[in-house]
Image: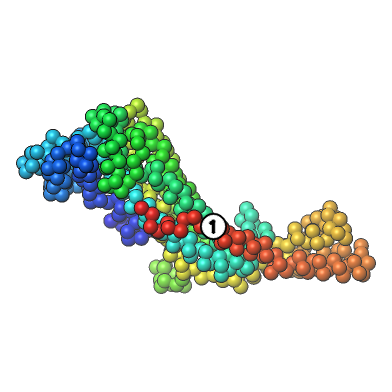
Amino acid sequence: MSLVKDYLGPADSGHWFADARWLDALLRFESALAQAQADCGLVPRPAAEAIARACAQAPLTCEGVVEQARASGALGLAVVRPLQQWLQAHAPEGLPWLHWGATTQDAVDTAQALLTQQALQALLAELGGLQSALQALARTHAATPMLARSLLQPAQITSFGFKCAQSAAAVGRSIEQFERLATAALCVQLGGAVGNGAVLGSHRAEVEQALARRLGLSACGRSWHTQRDDWMRLAMEAAVCGGSLAKLAKDWSLMAQYEVGEVSEAPRGSTSSAMPHKRNPVHLMQAVAQAQAVPPLAALLLGCMAQAHERALGEWQAEVAHWPDLWRHVHGAAAALRQAAQSLQVHPQRMLGHVRGLHGLVFSEACVHAMAPWTGKPEALAAVELLAPQALEQGRELRLLLAEWAAPRLDAAALQALQDALARACEPARAVQASHDACLALLAAPQIHANAHSHA
């Protein structure tokens, strides 16, 4: 446990790559490899069973493995040696077949794939929960008007539901990409010393498939010791997902500022040691903090792809060391936002108040189009540009100032028609209609990832 890290994420965040799970995954590889080779008739079944017993009973400790790996530079070798010692003492018939046809990177990459599979399942569960919560907010607030903001400035009218539907769709796209990429990325590694499977020879593909079946991973039919493209695409989708989560966290954080007050997190008791009145958005803070680490981690992992020749000197080892951090941070951000979304308090009156506080400026484009049939578009545009600052300064509605500007230029009937057109153009319910329709269209889009929670 880390005092300064773990409070930023859920209790289970990152435990998929805990030391005990690493050891278990490495031992699963060695046991399953021997059993797969026995399935293919290459290793005597008693020898494979002896190796399985060694993996279950050999006294491995994290401290001992680290000490040996520090000396040898090979994590997989630090696991194999205690197994060799156990077999020598208890079941020597298995000794010649332990780790047969494999190299240490085969063990580590396959173990990492097993752990990543579990991490991905947990992330998909959080993303599915977040998407469902966002969709519920979108349905409830499809026609709830609020300011759309461009370059942080008031722009036009959108709906809070449309914003939620857009974020739900982004989460859904990541779910779909994860499902598509996982099959190619979550593969067993069985290349042998230099990736050509020389020891297993013509039996390599058969053993690889048998090993994949036993471990519940894919068989890609090749070694990927220093060709990390499919593996890295999965990581980069995690980074892209982290970016989508960061965008949502930023939007809601800005909307949760007291001066804005459009959303707030559910009350949770005291969140400040000095100011008891404060309601800090804790989940949003956690999401922002977790997402902050994702871009540099993605860059670091991409930098690890330049691996020399058939086996890397340092780059692969760095990748293995930092790979878990990416998944921990993205999962932490997703979990925090899922909790925020499931209990988010939305304040439609504050949203509408910000719209009305601009005295119609957010309808400026609509006003230009409304006036154009009577004044021409250039004149209408010039009038809006002239009078918009006055609307704010005087606290008067822009449509009234525009009508006064047009009065000397139009007869009574035309002026009345213009006033009616301006009134329609400045109705929030009318202005939000496009966002309402776009929101419903996003919600109605096919969901091809319905089984995301059960991804294996």
| Neighbour tally class for label 1: few under 14, some 14-19, many 20 plus, Cα within 10 Å | few
Q: Is residue 311 in sight in this rendering?
A: yes
Expressed as whole percent of the image width and height from the top left, the position of residue 451 reads 42, 58
Expressed as whole percent of the image width and height from the top left, the position of residue 140 reads 56, 70
Which residue is at the far right? 411
Residue 60 vs 272, above or below: the answer is: above
Which residue is at 73% across, 62% downward?
A: 363
Which residue is at 93% across, 67% downward?
A: 411
Q: Could you tell whether 393 is left or right of 154 in the image?
A: right
Expressed as whole percent of the image width and height from the top left, the position of residue 143 reads 63, 68
Which residue is at the far left? 89
Q: How is the image coloured?
A: rainbow
Q: Nearer the viewer, residue 309 or 12?
A: 309
Which residue is at 88% across, 60% downward?
A: 374
Q: Could you tell whether 187 is left or right of 135 in the image?
A: left
Q: Nearer the viewer, residue 49 or 132?
A: 49
Q: Could you tell whether 310 is left or right of 416 in the image?
A: left
Q: Nearer the viewer, residue 395 or 55?
A: 55
Expressed as whole percent of the image width and height from the top left, the position of residue 130 reads 46, 61
Q: Is residue 69 in sight in this rendering?
A: no
Q: Quadrant of residue 49?
A: top left
Q: Quadrant of residue 404?
A: bottom right
Secondary structure state at the residue bearing disc 1: loop
Label 1 is placed on what type of residue? Pro
Residue denoted by label 1: 446
